[in-house]
Image (cartoon, helix red, strand yellow):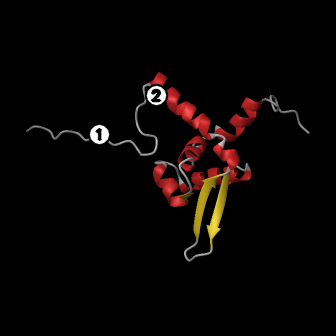
Amino acid sequence: MAFVPNSDCPVCRTADIVCGKWTLLVIRDLADGRCRFGELERSLEGISPRTLSLRLRSLEEEGIVARQTFPEVPPRVEYELTEKGRALVPIIESMRSYGTEWLGATGSCSEPPETATLAPAVA
């Protein structure tokens, strides 16, 4: 077995799982309850379907997300956090508090930010 630096460090092991781009945001969105792929894709503005699929698959392999397929036409698939996944929600909440207190972020995490509208030019 190859030596992996800090392989027994709990912070490093957790970071290996949750620090991929989009991963914490997927967990954040699933913290509110089960979602379908399209719902997650809409809430994570800018994520590609391939990236979302890879993140969900990775989280499923880690036991953080459970995937349920319903035998319908067209097929319906829903994702939800497992007990192991729900244990990560306090990390998300701590990040929300940190962002509000120390970074001045006051927007809603569950909805995409509104785009500013420009005033019409005066002729």
Q: Is residue 85 left or right of residue 118?
A: right
* Residue type of the residue flagged with mark 1: Ala
Identify which residue is drawn at 34% across, 43% down: 114
Q: Give the distance between the C-alpha atoms of the residues marked 2 and 1, in whole angstroms.
A: 21 Å
Residue 95 falls in image quadrant = top right
Q: Is residue 23 left or right of residue 13?
A: left
| The C terminus, quarter of image | top left
- Judged from this view, the residue extending furthest toward the right is 1
Residue 27 falls in image quadrant = top right
Identify which residue is drawn at 47% across, 24% down: 101
Q: SS at mark 2?
A: helix
**Relative to the observer, which residue lies in front, 80 or 60?**
80
| The N terminus, quarter of image | top right
Disc on the earlier residue, 2 or 1: 2
**Relative to the observer, which residue lies in front, 83 or 11?**
83
- Judged from this view, the residue extending furthest toward the bottom is 73
Q: SS at mark 1?
A: loop
Q: Position of residue 28 (x, y in %)?
A: 55, 44
Q: Position of residue 75 (x, y in %)?
A: 58, 72
Label for residue 116?
1
Question: Are there few (<14), some (14-19), or many (20+) residues within 10 Å of tag 1?
Answer: few
Identify which residue is drawn at 16% across, 41% down: 120
Question: Are there few (<14), some (14-19), or many (20+) residues within 10 Å of tag 2?
Answer: few
Q: Are marks 2 and 1 in contact (CB under 8 Å)?
A: no
Residue that mark 2 sits on: 100
* Residue type of the residue flagged with mark 2: Thr
